[in-house]
Image: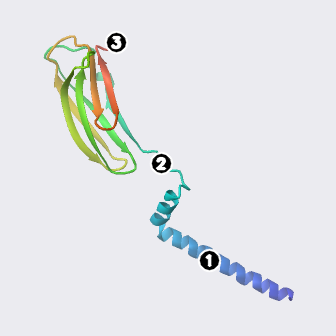
Amino acid sequence: MKPKTEKKIIQVLSGVLFFMILCLGLFLDLHRDQVYAAVYSARLIKRPEPFTEMYFNNYTAFPKQSVSGMRFSYSFTIHNMEVATSAYQYSTYFEYPNGFKVGMGEGTITLHSLEYYVATTTYTFKNSNLHGKVVVDLLGRDQHIDFLLPDVNQ
């Protein structure tokens, strides 16, 4: 082959290759969701680890001990990091050391991915000097948070 012909063939092939790469990029961009689904199902990309954050807000304001007739409020946050819409059923209660529980409140909330919900519970102590813990339990998820009364860290 003549050098000019070889050069012409290389230019044409380079142009065709460039055009094919451009078309492939456009196709992948237009069908991004389907491509990600296929890549995820083939386990070629690491999936994000789904979890739920749950924590008390303003925990420094929690009571240090219980006083009969004392009313207190506390709030907690449920933050959906499940990468999907999830329904959360929660229960709040006071649990004595012997396992006996006194209900304080409950609720159900549905959260989209990355959405959060702040719940507030108000409760009036019936007795003074209670020993136990205030618990927020995500039912069916084996997840809870709690704080102790009296506060032994004071």
**Which label lies toward us, 2 or 1?**
2
| Numbered disc 1: secondary structure | helix
Residue 88 at x, y percent in the picture = 28, 42
Which quadrant holds residue 146? top left
Left-right relation of 139 to 1 = left
The answer to which of marks 2 and 1 sits earlier in the sequence is 1
| Residue 71 drawn above or below residue 89 | above
- Asked whether 16 or 85 is in front, the reply is 85
Tell me the amino acid under the disc marked 3.
Val
Counting other residues with Cα less than 10 Å from the Cα at mark 3, is it few (<14), some (14-19), or many (20 or more)? few
Counting other residues with Cα less than 10 Å from the Cα at mark 1, is it few (<14), some (14-19), or many (20 or more)? few
* Residue at 30%, 38% in the rendered image: 140
The answer to which of marks 3 and 2 sits earlier in the sequence is 2
Distance from label 2 to label 1 (Cα)? 32 Å
- Asked whether 143 or 122 is in front, the reply is 143
Counting other residues with Cα less than 10 Å from the Cα at mark 2, is it few (<14), some (14-19), or many (20 or more)? few
Residue 136 marker = none
Residue labelled with disc 1 = 20
* Residue at 49%, 62% in the rendered image: 38
Image quarter hosting the C terminus: top left
Tell me the amino acid under the disc marked 1.
Met
